[in-house]
Image (cartoon, coloured by chain):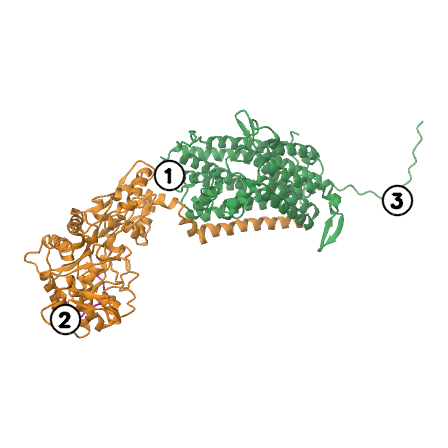
Chain colours: A orange, B green
Amino acid sequence: MNTPLRRVGMAMMVMIVLLLGNATWVQVINADEWRKNAYNRRVLLDEYARKRGLITVADGTVIADVKETSDRLRFLRTYNSGPAYAPVTGYLSVTYGTSGMERAENDLLNGSDDRLFTRRVSALITGRDPVGGNVQLTLNSKVQQTAYDQLTAKGFTGSVVAIKPDTGEILAMASTPSYDPNLLASHDVNEQAAAWKQLTAKDAGDPLVNRATQALYPAGSTLKVVVAAAALADGKNKDTQYTAKGSITLPGSQTPLPNFNGTPCGPGETVSMETALAKSCNTAFGEMAGQLGANKLRRQAEKFGFNDPDLAVPLAVETSTLGPIPDDAALYQTGIGQRDVQITPLENAVIAATIANNGKRMQPYLVSKILGPDLKSIDDTEPDQVDTAMSTANANALRDMMIQSETNTGGEGRLQNVQVASKTGTAEHGADVTKNKPHAWYIAFAPAQKPEIAIAVIVEDGGDRGLGATGGKVAAPIGRAVMNAYLAGR
Amino acid sequence: MGSPVPAGEGSPGASVATNTSPGLKAPTRRGTELVMLSFAAGLVTLALILVELNQERSLSLRILYLGLAYLGLFACAHLAVRRWAPYADPAILPCVALLNGLGLVVIHRIDLALEGTVFPDGSTWDPVAFKQVIWTGIGLLLFAATLKFLPDHRMLARFGYTFGLVGLVALLLPGVLPGFIAPTINGAKIWLRIGPLSLQPGEFAKILLMVFFAAFLVSKRDLFTVAGRRFLGMDLPRARDLGPLFAAWGVTVAVMVLQKDLGSSLLFFGIVLVLLYIATERAAWVVLGLGLFAGGAIIAWKLFTHVQQRVANWQDPIARYDVIGGGYQISQSLFGLATGGIGGAGLGAGRPEMIPEANTDFITAVIGEELGFVGFAALLLVYMVFALRGLRGAISVRDSFGKLLGGGLAFAVCFQVFIVVGGVTKLIPMTGITAPFLSYGGSSLLANYILVALLLRISAAARAPQRIAKPKPQQPAIADQHTVMVERPK
């Protein structure tokens, strides 16, 4: 009987080995699949049991805090000035997950980031609870608040982005309508659900979308600075002459391309590039784009940051594009920022900042420092030049033209004693331009000779001016107020 | 029966060493056992300390007393072995002590986690760790009593048929009795309720039937080895000898249908097959039996919804996560195991209370989550050492009944572990069965302590020095004897 007994022994060992093999599969090799399953609340509960890191703005003001509670999820996330900062901070919700910085820097905030490894080990040894790291943003509280207040004062739907041109630090990133992330961070499941239902309702206006990075708009006339930059790179200068007609016909079609209100750009047959930009003449820029061709235009746009699907600040940013440009008619229309041109407010701010920074494009970023739980800096973000979009001479030439443009732009709130370089845009969208109210754009930087802030402002659907809205009337006052808030507070 | 040293030739209990080399006592290895028991006690105390620390309770001397009480309990068991089975295998009892101790710690850990929880039906969690301590004490008493009153395992063979009848009744009783004494709990009808006590007679029936089968097969062994026809290189048994196999199969199906207890029926049938194989040394029985089982399983799957449910939960637990009786439990088990990963969350630091039945059928998942793959593998290896040491005794023991019973008992434990751990880790469909020595439940623990006593008894018989029959004094051949005249009585 010993032979079969030994075989039974073998069978028992095989059974144990099978169990060990399967355990290896479940716990080691394939563990991530189960760990990251949406139904697995263990990881989330663990994160809540750890004290999450804080999010602060540049001056140290805490905008995302934690409060210890007595309930099962030991720590409650609280947001100060929630709606103003919500597009950047995002929310942290047990039921609805995370967004914004809470998502982009989640590993760091919950303490599992590798950069916190040594601190975790020491916490393990000393027996203290591991704590998340803190994120210090580049946002300037005054600029951010001004941007948010300006947008909400008249109930606008839109966005403001402000960038420090020589570093790429994002000084403000506002988006309206906004929301209070405290409601979604609540530990009361019903309160969360009610807030979620309200925020995602059809008529709520998509408050959870950060328009600065997630929304794509037609660029309108603000794209003319990109076309001008391409023309300058192509050997043209501010005095190069273009057509001054009030309206031209698109090549290969009967469709007219008129100037604003169909008025001619100047008294003569032709007009200089400088005047064309200052008066934002569509006919001249259509012709300019036509002369350059799609390739040169596209190359210039890419140097300004178009077609970059991997851009993250570290919030993921939608990709701005010029569109397919299948023929010359499309090329003319692209030249004035219409047709299939799609751009985020952030990218438009990057264009302004790049011109302001003598043509050197800096990587835009929101996180200036990563701080350990002990508030010692672990990682500082260094400014990073990603491309040279223009030569210094061309950038200065374009700047001078934009100064002329600012002089030509109406609207309120002109800055005193500070020279501003800007470009407005009134972007038509939708099928029927006579009924759809245009988006109002304004990109600018100041002081023009030594720029310290570059901004992009968009107000959707004409703001309070409806069909008669222009970038100058609706968006420019907001941009000027934002720049003033920064320059006055230096 | 009071004497620990029964008389008789070749008695396995003989403690008087009368070996071929007189004066040299065979080592009993009881000292080794005591050292290993102390080690197990140390590990269990450490585990308890970790649980208390991680559940953020203050450490007190109470833990030390608990550890000492536990050590004392098993020291008594050790003394019982020393007194009544001095030559028993030294590794088996420490394995059991470690498993049982760890089980107590985990049951206590689940108690702490669920303390004060109010369930949807309004009832509150009832701590059970103390009850399990009482059961452990009773189990060890039963263990000692078995060793004391069963000096020779062969005594059992005499009552083979009695045991068989009692076992069969015990196995099927809950299935046929009305609901007020045999309630259906968690879908299975395997309990008997007598006053405040709940018993699972099936746990004891398992051992009784094993004794019966061992005795029966030893006495009828020749019958089963008579060859029938040869088929595919195997000697098939004769049709008339298939009776016991079909009987076992019938009982298995009855258990599955009447009591909806898939795990027990699988376990029971597996044990019968292995016993048949050990007794006859012929693989044909196994093949035939597996064929029968496969057929039965397929029919059961077609007919019974509870079988279909288990299979569907096994195939894709996530898809049936929200279904009542669906994949929630197995999913939680897998989430726990995967989140534990290699090193585990730490005893008392995971969230195993999220798994329903965490302290009974899914107790191994708790250990996998909190001690990680490392602890899980160690647990399986402890089971393997236990089963292989038991098998070792069966191989060395000299009588056929002992070999058969010992092999069957060792296999039963290993196979039960395979069924329950395989179910918990999604290797096979979950069938609902306890983990030996770990799970909360009195019947299972008591029955398993009797099982351990039997294994120790068999291993003691195997390791005890055999009393060699005294050589009879040499007598000259009768033919060489002188003729003696015997006087006729007057």
Query: Circle 2 sits in a helix, a strand or a loop, which is it?
Result: helix
Count of picture labels: 3
Q: Which residue is at 52% across, 25% downward?
A: B196
Query: Circle 1 sits in a helix, a strand or a loop, which is it?
Result: helix
Which is more foreground, mark 3 or mark 2? 2
Q: Is residue A397 magenta?
A: yes
Q: Separation of disc 3 and disc 2 at Cα?
A: 138 Å
Image-based side of B95 in relation to A265, left or right? right
Query: Circle 3 sits in a helix, a strand or a loop, which is it?
Result: helix
The image position of residue B161, as x and y in percent, is 70, 34
Chain ID, mark 1: B
Q: Specify the label residue B53 is tagged with.
A: 1
- Disc 2 target residue: A393
Please provide the residue range marked out in magenta: A383-399
Q: Separation of disc 1 and disc 3 at Cα?
A: 87 Å
- Mark 1 crowd level (few <14, some 14–19, many ≥20, 10 Å Cα): some
Q: Specify the label residue B283 is tagged with.
A: none
Chain ID, mark 2: A
For badge 2, the amino acid type reads Ala
Could you tell which of marks 1 and 3 lies nearer the N-terminus?
Answer: 1
